[in-house]
Amino acid sequence: MKLTDTAAVVTGGASGIGAGIARALAERGCSIMLADIDTCAAEEVAASLRERGAVAKVMACDVSDYASVEALADAAWSAFGSVQMIFNNAGVMSSAPVIDADPREVHWIIDTNLKGVWNGCSVFGKRFRAQRLPACIAITASEHSLGVPHLGGGIYTASKHAVLGMADVMRQELPDFITVSLTFPGMVRTRIYEATRSSPIGPAPENVRAFGERAMAYGMDPLEVGQRAVQGVEEGEFMVMTHPHVRVIAEKRWQAVDAAFARAPEIDNPEQYEVEAVMARLVAENK
């Protein structure tokens, strides 16, 4: 996909990976709309892009609210005439053992990381389909989509697993002129540890946030992740990897799956249960 003279929307564009994506897009001659609940920080990012000669605008958006995402799309099409890319990047995280997580925070994480991504895919995907121009739905997934990097983030991990599954189906349902691209970063030098400032149960304790800040300081530069994500869109990649060590996380998951199949009972005619074969047979019977 050629990006020069195209327009893109980046959710969660006020900092971190979102800001890195925006800068990578600006370097390729794209116009960008940064969407975030923190419009002051987004304006700072936009100003830095405009200093480099880019067209950059800001829109307040709560990705968990479908109407807010619709308003974002309206503003983007009004500003640019057409939009060819949506980067569903906004995400939140908190830390708690799965069974001890507060129900309000569970809803907050799922509403942002899964429902928020679906909102962006649905709103922008429908417009891309009607527009009939080459377009891309891009998503910031995570190493958590592929396995279990660490304990304590089970709800976040669940949301990122779900995003991968949803996107894998979606890319097979869309017309050929709309591509889907997911980036799977590991640790990145972001401020996601501050996400709980908007949590319905209030911010995490100071010691927890301080630990998160120290940990994220070891992460990859967000611009490097943003460059890789945008390159993936250019090259039509569905899975975009940024951290080589994440292969180990994915392999550990596959090894568990493979071992489970090795213990499964044998069936005389396993093809009879294959979903695609059954569906094809039903379609043929109804012709």
Image (cartoon, rainbow, N blue to C red):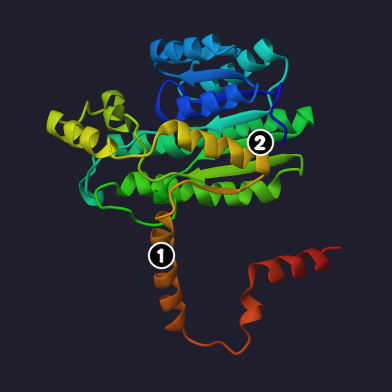
Q: Which mark is residue 6?
A: none
- Between discs 1 and 2, the one toward the N terminus: 2
Residue 63, can we see it? no
Against 173, residue 93 (above or below) is above
Q: Which mark is residue 253?
A: 1
Query: Which residue sits at x=40%, y=34%?
Result: 221
x and y, in percent, of residue 134 in the image: 75, 34
In the structure shown, which secondary structural element does the residue marked by tag 1 occupy?
helix
On-image quarter of the C terminus: bottom right
x and y, in percent, of residue 157 in the image: 37, 48
Marks 1,2: beta carbons within 8 A: no
Label 2: which residue? 136
Query: Which residue sits at x=75%, y=67%?
Result: 280
Residue 40, can we see it? yes
Rendering quarter of residue 207: top left
Report the residue that reaches farthest toward the bottom: 268
x and y, in percent, of residue 194 in the image: 28, 27
Number of numbered tags placed on the structure image: 2
Against 27, residue 149 (above or below) is below
For the residue pair 276 and 282, the one nearer the viewer reads as 276
Q: Which amino acid type is marked by label 2?
A: Cys
x and y, in percent, of residue 69 in the image: 54, 23
Q: What whole-number distance in Å separates the C-alpha atoms at marks 1 and 2? A: 29 Å
